[in-house]
Amino acid sequence: MSSPPFCALFLLACLIPVPAALHAAVEMAVNVMGQEFGVERYQAQGTHLVIWVAPVFGSNQRYVRTAEKLAADGVEVWTVDLAENLFLPKSSRTMRSLDGRYVAALIESAHRSTGKPVTLLAQSYGALPVLRGARRWQLRQQLIPDANYLSGVILISPDLYSEIPALGLEPVYDPIATATNVPIMIYQAGKRGNRWQLPQLLDRLRAGGSEVRLKMLEGVTGVFNDQDESAATLAVLAQMPLYIEQGVEALYGTPTPSKARKLLTQAEATSRGLDMELKTYRGDPVPAALSLKDINGGLVTRTDYTGQVTLVNFWASWCPPCVEEIPALNRLREIMQGQPFELISIDYAEDAGIIRKFLQTMEVEFPVLLDADGRVSASWKVLVYPSTFVIGADGRIVYGVNGAIRWDDPAVVGKLDALVGQAR
């Protein structure tokens, strides 16, 4: 059999769709301040480059697919896991501790290697080293004429807290929030807990001189969280490459100031990390009223908490520590049976159908109320999950814990018994 003519082969090749693998990541080593950093590069022929600081706990398929689609559309992507390259624990505390020098050096390396303008991209606590890196880059470049190749920063549901505050207290923002003046595009998940602190965050960023654009991702808890499989999230996830491309173009058209803002002294944090035990509550001791539907559609209202000990637990099914402490809460409820004690469980901003499905696989022996839009959680100043309030018989909050604990631990039960004794 004779071979087909070359032109026929060429035509056939043109008709075959380009496989996604052609835009898959290529691992490469980049010299960053004398250290070899591992970077995954999604190479593209377009004019823009995005440095994507990987999430705290590593990338997943949602990140990979988004980066591949960006590369297919002509936006080159470099993803980097700072904690892994620096041999540090993968935690929010690590991200809060990084001063930005490595991000600044990556910006220089990426531009030197490709000649492309650079946009930084991060989410959650990754926003801190990224903004610090942008400012450090400004400090290093402001004496060099025409070195303005940093387009700006894209942040997805950013957390700019210095520390997780004690339950009930207002968050303390890192000084970089008011020392940033580069252009910023924020994509904020509408159901994420930090959504309710967004006005304060925007005030701080704009006070520093940043031109900030905002797009709300309605109905979304975590667009890159595999646990969030709601229809709204999956729809937004499909659009994220386009959103990021639009953000890159918008930032590229906005001038980046060549001079960095002054960085003020670090504010003193009110707390250090998550609570892992019952602690004396330091916020406003008067609990907010509740009026929510339970999983069966019944209305549950609480305006007066006096006469018994009440435990109010905020949680979500996508939160592993929340799920892990459910059996201990079940056992606590059994221990306290017959006493003036009530356990109120409030699910944060999940669809009723998702919770019903969850309850088919997880034994939950207490009523579940639905905070459909997260406003009740915001009124209680809940920032992390799980968060639990213990209200005494006098109707005032006595203890709080913003973390998962063993609720049937004898020491915990002893504290609750002491409060119950005051109710008799």
Image: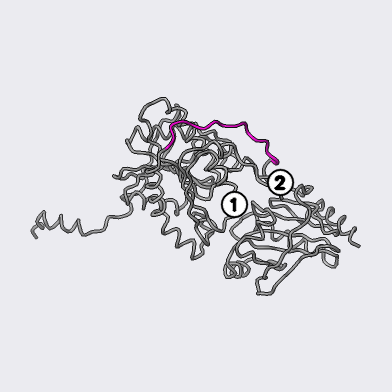
Report the amino acid beneath label 2.
Ala
Question: Is label 2 in a helix, a strand or a loop?
Answer: loop
Q: Is residue 290 left or right of residue 20?
A: right
Q: Are marks 1 and 2 in contact (CB under 8 Å)?
A: no
Q: Position of residue 392 (x, y in %)?
A: 83, 57
Q: Between residues 265 and 3, which one lies in front from this camera angle?
A: 265
Quadrant of the rendered image containing residue 339 = bottom right
Q: Is residue 318 magenta?
A: no
Crowdedness near tag 1: few (<14), some (14–19) or many (≥20) residues, C-alpha within 10 Å: many
First along the sequence among labels 1 and 2: 2
Visual colour scheme:
one colour
Region of the chain picked out in magenta, as a range: 256-271
Residue at x 74%, y 53% (from the top left corner): 406
Q: Which residue extends farthest right?
A: 424
Q: Which residue lies under the disc numbered 2?
A: 166
Q: Residue 270 bears which disc, if any?
A: none
Distance between the alpha carbons at the discs numbered 1 and 2: 15 Å
Q: Position of residue 92 (x, y in %)?
A: 58, 43
User: Is residue 147 depicted above or below 286 in this figure?
Assistant: above
Q: Is residue 262 magenta?
A: yes
Q: Is residue 172 left or right of residue 126?
A: right
Q: Between residues 87 and 64, which one lies in front from this camera angle?
A: 64
Quadrant of the rendered image containing residue 239 = bottom left
Label count reads: 2
Q: Which residue lies under the disc numbered 1?
A: 194
Residue at x 27%, y 55% (from the top left corner): 18
Q: Position of residue 108 (x, y in %)?
A: 40, 32
Identify the main secondary structure in magenta. Answer: loop
